Amino acid sequence: MSLKVPSIEAPRLGEPFLLTPGPLTTSYDAKAAMLKDWGSWDGDFRRMTQQMRDRLIEMLGSGHENFDCVPMQGSGSFSVEAMLGSFVPKDGKVLVLSNGAYGQRAAKTLTYLKREHIVLDKGDYLPPRGEEVSKILKADEDITHVVAVHCETSSGILNPIEEISDATYKAGRKLLVDSMSAFGAIPIEPNKIKYEAVVSSANKCIEGVPGFGFILARKSALEAAKGNSHSLCLDLHDQWSHMNKTGQWRYTPPTHVLAAFLVALEAHRKEGGVIGRGARYNKNKNTLVSGMRSIGFEALLGERWLSPIIVTFFCPADPRFDFTQFYDLMKSKGFIIYPGKLTVVDSFRIGCIGQMDNQIMLKVVKAAKQSLQEMGVSDASPPTKALDERKRLQS
Ligand SMILES: *Cc1c(COP(=O)(O)O)cnc(C)c1O
């Protein structure tokens, strides 16, 4: 397969690059697609919706025939809530695998939905393992569903979704996956990894603008979801059956966002689909991590758990390092970075997704080096406490 090198054109508008995991830097063409108004009931727009649904299902790869796509208005969390409320029956019980903010949010959502659940809390970044899942499911027969986060964007860890899926289905339970920040760049083929539904959104690896999410679910799960939802607006079964009947979204769709998304989807296809997109992000990540290491920074995660989506770096121990100042210096050089979310040590994050290639990542490293110099930080190595933390991961 020949991969087309994507054209990187954010500077055309003089904007900084968003090194954040969504909203992220989109292409000029995707933005330009929003310069037209669409009638939501019109045949053209209905065809656009269908085209998007077909393409997203196709992207799943082998085994996709049993799936359908239900888009949902709102940010990604609205789609997670729609998935949980629609697929977990009112008398179901959920095991939430949490190692960061998004696992915690899933658990909090279930509390709001009054769905019984327990949480395997692995802290900031330790991966939930298949063995642990097996043990918990064996001990608790009432658990009907497991919820897992594919790439936990708060640390950047790529969770072992395959072994989690194996453990779940070996125990006869069902898996729901938050693949918000991974879908489109990391394969999740139904024939290789079993699950009931996976959720993602417009503004992550497909590189669209924010405004809706989508759930790719087994048709059998969608059929069984009738009457489960706590919410009219977030009822996936209702959105699905209405869309299949009329070709329309229930309630006002984000028309411009969908128009931009179709352009982004086409660029994704041209880049070589999930494999091509993943390859570019991986190269971004490798360039970033080796570059940052070369100027003294350390990444939180070892190779085994690093995702090509976003990387967490420890803040340097040097007292002259100040994150707010570092952020402003990076921004003045054209790069918006992201604060960290670790509770034990100070950190920051740099995203690898969006309209950026490894040449841009080299410039990111150069900007970081200059920013350190401007702050008077000569040594970027983290405090020993941070390195001790990292050791826990490897043991
Ligand atoms: C982005 C993201 C979400 C959704 O966040 P929103 O701010 O609601 O779009 C959920 N889970 C993960 C893993 C994410 O990266």
Image (cartoon, rainbow, N blue to C red):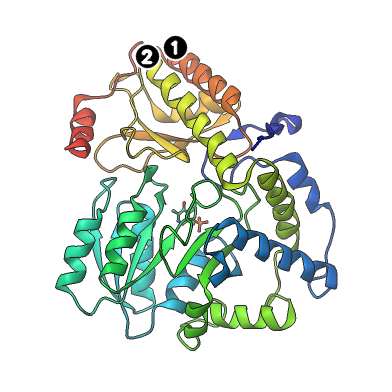
Give the residue at mark 2.
377
Spatial separation of the CA atoms under disc 2 and disc 1: 6 Å
Crowding near the residue tagged with mark 1, few <14, some 14–19, many ≥20 C-alpha atoms within 10 Å: few
Residue beneath the point at 71% across and 59% down: 258
List x then y, in percent, for residue 299. Answer: 34, 29
Mark 2, secondary structure of its residue: loop
Decide which of 8, 66 is in the foreground and name it. 66
Q: x%, y% of residue 131?
A: 20, 57
Kind of residue at badge 2 = Val
Which percent across, then down, holds residue 219?
A: 53, 77
Q: Position of residue 66 (x, y in %)?
A: 54, 71
Could you classify mark 2 by the number of other residues whose Cα lies within 10 Å: few (under 14), some (14-19), or many (20 or more)? some
- In the displayed structure, 8 sits above or below 240; it is above
Quarter of the image containing the C terminus? top left
Tell me if I can see residue 363 in this picture: yes
Residue position marked by numbered label 1 in the rendering: 373
147, 380: nearer the viewer: 147
In the image, the residue with mark 1 has its CB under 8 Å from the nearest atom of ligand 1? no
Mark 2 vs 1: CB contact within 8 A: yes
